[in-house]
Image (cartoon, rainbow, N blue to C red):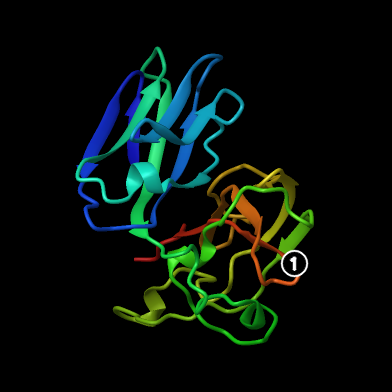
């Protein structure tokens, strides 16, 4: 994660010559902003994401932008991340910056409406979770999401007895969401910390997105970033 303070900035120039359907996505967060102070993510002068006072509680916001005229076939696509504060206590955070080509939006082979209405279990690329438009949705999301289960360890290094207490138990996850326009917003914005003192995992939920996709039969899709971190360590 890149932390930029005060009036700092960071930039990179990319060559997308011969590449079309370029999509730029990233995660943003901010703390200690006052009125008139901002965190910016820009590409070719176009705003990818912006956070201001009121969105400076450390909550993670996921931003996605595509613009064929500015991003596609560009030998010098400039991406800039910057802070427009007035003190070193003004913090902007940027993470998971992705520049990729997504032909026609989300590939039809991934996360189809048939799959989403089945009991199948599969994984997808990041592109499958990116919103395709910001138009008003046919439906409005509001309510709580509860997830239960048992973690699956694909690889275990060392002795299983070194795992922290309750590591084999899914962290307590019960999050309430509301929808504002195209944003899916968690009501609890306390950030990454255990739900209970004896949980082995910390969980953080960021602001997601909602959108309608052609061919989904009037249903509305939603996605949000979910972060896990182990909070206990037994040596």
The residue at 29%/27% (across/down) is 9
Where in the figure is residue 46, as x and y percent of width and height? 41, 34
Identify the image quadrant of the C terminus: bottom left
> How packed is label 1: few (under 14 Cα within 10 Å), some, or many (20 or more)?
some
Q: Please, is residue 197 above or below residue 41 in the view? A: below
Asked if residue 83 lies left or right of residue 12, the reply is: right
| Residue 108 visible in image | yes
Where in the figure is residue 68, as x and y percent of width and height? 40, 49
Give the secondary structure at mark 1: loop
The residue at 55%/50% (across/down) is 193
| Residue 1 visible in image | no
Q: State the image quarter where residue 148 is shown.
A: bottom right
Where in the figure is residue 173, as x and y percent of width and height? 65, 62
The residue at 61%/52% (across/down) is 209
Asked if residue 124 lies left or right of residue 97, the reply is: right
Residue on which the image places disc 1:
219
Q: Please, is residue 86 above or below residue 10 in the view? A: above
Asked if residue 183 lies left or right of residue 13, the reply is: right
Front residue of 22/129: it is 22
The residue at 58%/61% (across/down) is 198
Q: Please, is residue 115 above or below residue 188 in the view? A: below
Where in the figure is residue 67, as x and y percent of width and height? 42, 46
């Amino acid at each position: 994660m890149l932390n930029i303070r005060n009036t700092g900035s960071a930039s990179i120039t990319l060559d997308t010559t011969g590449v079309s359907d370029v999509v730029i996505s990233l995660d943003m967060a901010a703390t200690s902003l006052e009125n008139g102070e901002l965190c910016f993510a820009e590409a070719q002068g176009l705003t990818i994401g912006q956070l201001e006072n009121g969105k400076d509680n450390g909550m993670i916001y996921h931003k996605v932008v595509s613009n064929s005229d500015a991003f596609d076939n560009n030998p010098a696509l400039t991406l800039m991340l910057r802070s427009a504060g007035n003190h070193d206590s003004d913090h902007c955070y940027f993470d998971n910056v992705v520049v990729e080509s997504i032909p026609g939006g989300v590939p039809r082979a991934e996360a189809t409406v048939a799959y989403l209405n089945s009991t199948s279990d599969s994984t997808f690329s990041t592109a499958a979770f990116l919103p395709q438009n910001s138009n008003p949705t046919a439906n409005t999301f509001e309510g709580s999401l509860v997830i239960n289960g048992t973690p699956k360890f694909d690889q275990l290094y060392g002795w299983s007895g070194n795992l922290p207490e309750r590591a084999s138990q899914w962290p307590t996850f019960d999050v309430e969401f509301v929808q504002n326009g195209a944003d899916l917003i968690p009501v609890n914005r306390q950030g990454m910390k255990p739900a209970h003192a004896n949980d082995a995992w910390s969980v953080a939920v960021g602001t997601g997105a909602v959108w309608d996709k052609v061919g989904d039969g009037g249903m509305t899709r939603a996605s949000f970033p979910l972060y896990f971190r182990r909070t206990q360590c037994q040596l």
